[in-house]
Image (tube, coloured by chain):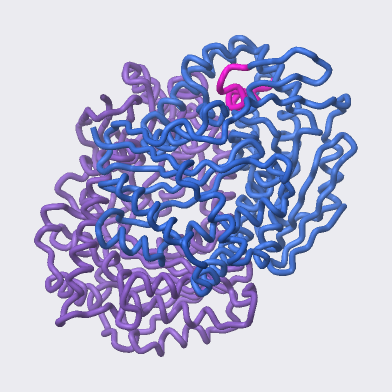
Amino acid sequence: MQIIENSRVKEKLYVEKLENGLTIMIMPKANIQKKYVIWSTNFGSIDNKFIAPNENEETFIPDGVAHFLEHKMFEQPNGTNSLDTLTALGVNANAYTSTDHTCYLFECTDNFLPALDELMDYVQTPYFTDQNVEKEKGIIGQEIKMYDDYPQWEVYMNALRNMYKNNPITIDIAGSIESIAKIDKDVLYKCYNTFYHPSNMVMCFAGDFVPEQLLEEVKKRLKNREKHGEIKRIYPEEPEEIVKKEITKQMEVSMPIFVIAIKDSIDSKNCKSDSIVKKHIAIEILLNMLIGKSSKLYKNLYESELITEEPYLEYEFSKQYAHIAITGQSNNPKEVLKKLQEEIRNMKSKDLDIEHFQRIKNMIYGNYVKEYDDVAEICRMFVADYMKGINSFEYIENYKQVTPEYAKQVLDEVFNEEKMVISIVEPN
Amino acid sequence: MSYEIKEIKKGIKTHFIKTNKFKTDLFAIFLTVPLDKNNVTQNALIPAVLRRGTENLKTQEEISIMLENMYGANLDCGVEKIGDNQVLKFYLETLNDNFLPQVENLSKRAIELMLDVVLNPLMENDAFKKEYVEAEKKTIKRIIEGRIDNKDLYAYTRCIEEMYKGKQYGLYKYGYIEDLEKINAENLYESYKKLLSEAKIDIFVSGNFENNEIIKYIEENENIQKLNEREDKHIINTEETEKKEKVEVSTLHESKDVTQGKLVIGLDIDFYKPNSRYVICLYNVILGESATSKMFQNVREKAGLAYSARSTYLRQKNNIFIRAGIEIENYEKALNIIKEQLEDMKNGNFTDEEIENAKKYMISGIKTVQDEQDSEITYYLGQELSGKLISFEDYMKNINSVTREQIVEIANNINMNIIYFLKN
């Protein structure tokens, strides 16, 4: 196995790519009781158009299939449900779907190997019937309605719709009541056979493990699958510009909530992982310098009662999209936007404050180190980054190389007013 | 791992959790007082004002700069209801000195900063700084008004409020807008002084420290030295004090702008024997906490009525709450299925395997408490406030010794108190 060591966080990652194409990552954590594993496939809500291996025809699937499949994987041919089986072993099992991947996971203190048996068995055993597919529509329908009652979800989705014209990121991960009505067992099998091949999957473990032994345990439980050709994923061409600048929706909230977002461009030619990581770090630093807790703008907004707490700052990206999102609550979101734009202009007009820059950089270093305390966080992070072609250690290794000059360049390129949108949910 | 408690002054304790599992150190201070309508609002406001500035770091900006310089240390303040007590919480998390890019002694700076925030606030004319008090009154007002923003949580807290109408536990932890209006910098400072002289104080340190030098450092801190001795007046809630007789079931339907109905059912437990909490824990896991539970299996998997369907055990008040998000027109259907599950529990219609699974579930949960610094502190604080320290080993032993008969006995003494439904 390849061993990647990081001396700053004092952790090692063991990596192996098996002959069938499956990637396995293991981070041993002595002294921790909890063992955690995620088995993930590179199939998410945005993968809705593709040409399956050995086919010539395009397949176009209803919205919400990746998530629907996640729900249905637990059902087994002998009538059992793997979630029940795992729970009965005393392990805590779960699954989730994002825009670009689907994860099956469990955490446990005891019964690790029997639980691994079950996890690896059910993910390799699809079993869909007309009846079990129909039943799930009611459950997922309630999941969709639960999200409909979350104003934070609504305001974020509207921001995406304002930024992206064609990109399927604007589709709700769970789909809609109408789109899931169209899902049947055939489309689930088709997607399973296409995307749930070892060569399209990664497994990540963190806990008190001996990596070589664990690797053998995984190999023993893998079923033979024929070699897989390439999956051709088809994504629509996305224009550089945004769709529209503003959107407001009424819901029952106590105070308006907002997302200010900036669409970023994807440079498909220059997608080396270290340059993506550097850019990500620079954006995090810039966001905190602009509107973070110790910034002048934050102080100004807080004192003029335009915001009451620190906005949530995030740079979200995959191989298909990238944007900044600033989420907060304000009685006057448009005034917040105006002041933010002024501050960006002001920041662009001079060199970055070195002392401030260094301070935020230290803070971000601390945040990265803290990620390595929790086995669940480690697995989620390594898997999500893997899907972007990144090894999570790169953040700690590259942070030193982010200079004020480089960050300034990112500021000029990315923080573009023309690509900025605001989505508001206000009281009705 | 080791855990040591020391009473440094009457009513003031330090708790030292020595652990080498983490890259961070976590420090916490808890001020505990009985819940009281007369000062619940002031107490909720105090942490918000304290984090605005100290005599040494006069503004929020200065505090933030200090925290950023400490590699992104996190200062967290808040207020919680634990049983019939209101607990003011302050946390400070920093990187452990072993993980800093250069040699520094962050832990001592962290302790000083935290004690400074809690015990040495910025003063103006023998009161809090007026500007901060007025601004934070608005923050608390917004939080109180913001309660309707999360409809699931709103339904849950409304149900509790209704069940404990006119009682201490029915108070909202952030207080009341009408009381907020009466607060000014002077009377809030008086409340703060009273709080500091009367509250039970618990100071937690969790991290990889060689010896209890760190505790000595706290004891010798100037602000700690100034504190007086005090009687511990906090309220101890146990299964014995919280045994509740059967009442007529009430029903409350409220309307808000929701697309999904939120059903919450409050259950009372009319039973006490020593260690009955472990039996109730298992009852609750079988009824609705795990994925193999009756709620999950029957409301969600079999009937397909809900995505989220579960129950939780509120130990301090000895209640179980059943919660489900359902289609509004499926109210009767869901309610009937839930009632059937409660009957099944009474009749002992659950397998020995379900009991074993529930035990495994609880034990796995308790083992992992030690894998997270904040949940470990929460565990020990809960023990401290319940007046009895139970080790992780004893906890597991108690869970393992529960029998089927005990669970059925409990089931027959659990009664519905209220059915709350939030619809459109």
Residue at (35% x, 36% y) in the render: B152
Which image quarter: residue A182? top right
**x, y (%) of residue B236?**
30, 62
Judging by colour alone, the chain drawn in purple in this rendered image is B
Q: Identify the image quadrant of the N terminus of chain B.
A: bottom right
Q: Is residue A178 above or below residue B12?
A: above
Q: How many marks?
A: 0
For the magenta stretch, what is the residue range?
A61-76
Residue at (59% x, 34% y) in the render: A99
**x, y (%) of residue B302?**
51, 19
Residue at (54% x, 57% y) in the render: A284
**x, y (%) of residue A368?**
60, 61
Q: Identify the image quadrant of the C terminus of chain B.
A: top left
Does residue B196 show up?
yes
In the image, is A199 to the left or to the right of B147? right
Q: Nearer the viewer, residue A150 or A52?
A: A52
Q: Is residue B191 above or below residue A106?
A: below
Judged from this view, the residue extending furthest toward the front is: A349
Judging by colour alone, the chain drawn in blue in this rendered image is A
Judged from this view, the residue extending furthest toward the top is: A130
In the image, is A354 to the left or to the right of B422? right
Residue at (16% x, 63% y) in the render: B39
